[in-house]
Amino acid sequence: MREGGRIGRRFASLRQQRRAGLVTFVTAGDPDLATSVDIMRRLPAAGADIIELGMPFSDPMADGPIIQAASERALRAGQTMRRTLDMVATFRQEDAETPIVLMGYFNPVYVYGIARFLFAAKKAGVDGLILVDLPPEEAEEVVGPARNAGIDLIFLAAPTTGDVRLPLVVKHASGFVYYVSITGITGTASAALADVTHAVERIRAHCALPVAVGFGIKTPGQARAIGGSADAAVVGSAIVAKIADHLDAKGAPRADLVDVVASFVGSLAEGVHAARPRRSPV
């Protein structure tokens, strides 16, 4: 973890406060660009410590139906990679400290051009990158350029990641390790807390990076429970579902959509921020 970067500073601050963090995921451009920008602007004040911004893709194979639908809405509304990066740049005009992580698939980054993408992302104000379908065995062409650009490359660990493979997963990781607490797609199930606690301890035995846990966290109570084991709880599908639930029959955002999302994130933040992670501050 680059201690001088926003992600490093944010986790250092969380350790000093002796609390867990809340990582919120929304899809860029969902349900339209203007509404998506408004949602993004409201997240820090609502209690989000880190923002994951999904890069819409036409074949989001790791995502469940809720986030798949969000990608479809965003693409229909005209969202592009350039617009996603512009969203970050617009956000940075008002907020210079909240870490932003782009999350998505390798294909759009490859098509954009790896070096060109990383340069543009850094210029816009991006701090980290998660490419869910890029295994560490094949990540060399991204690892070096990301490091040179000053962008944390965040890798995923899962219940199926054994002790033999885990060191490879964390070898080039920076920022934090994202533990996917269930097997399968997003938004479909929740993991048992005892299993998550054991997995987080196992990851910490292999690296000193913070561990954020996601997939299946839907309520403030679940977020608080996860925050008692991990350094941060990641909530995505439950937030995206709130967006979908507040669209009218034509798919346009209702007047209260942004307020509803901010209120829900606030309740999640109250839960996770009340948690006290097992790991002592360093």
Image: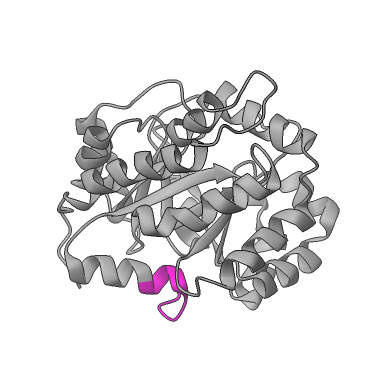
Looking at the image, which residue is at 16% across and 63% down?
18
Between 184 and 57, the one lying in front of the other is 57
In this view of the protein, can residue 120 be seen by the observer? yes
93 in relation to 54, above or below: below
Q: Which residues are magenta?
A: 1-9
How many numbered circles does the render carry? 0
Report which quarter residue 71 is drawn in: top right
264 in relation to 22, above or below: above
Q: Locate residue 160, reporting x and y percent.
A: 43, 32
Please identify the quadrant where the C terminus is shown: bottom left
Q: Locate residue 221, reporting x and y percent.
A: 21, 34
Looking at the image, which residue is at 71% across and 62% down?
86
Between 86 and 2, the one lying in front of the other is 86
Residue 257 lies within the magenta run: no
66 in relation to 196, above or below: above
- Using residue 224 as the reference point, say whether residue 182 is left or right of it: right
- Using residue 37 as the reference point, say whether residue 75 is left or right of it: right
Looking at the image, which residue is at 32% across and 46% down?
266
Between 274 and 106, the one lying in front of the other is 274
Please identify the quadrant where the N terminus is shown: bottom left
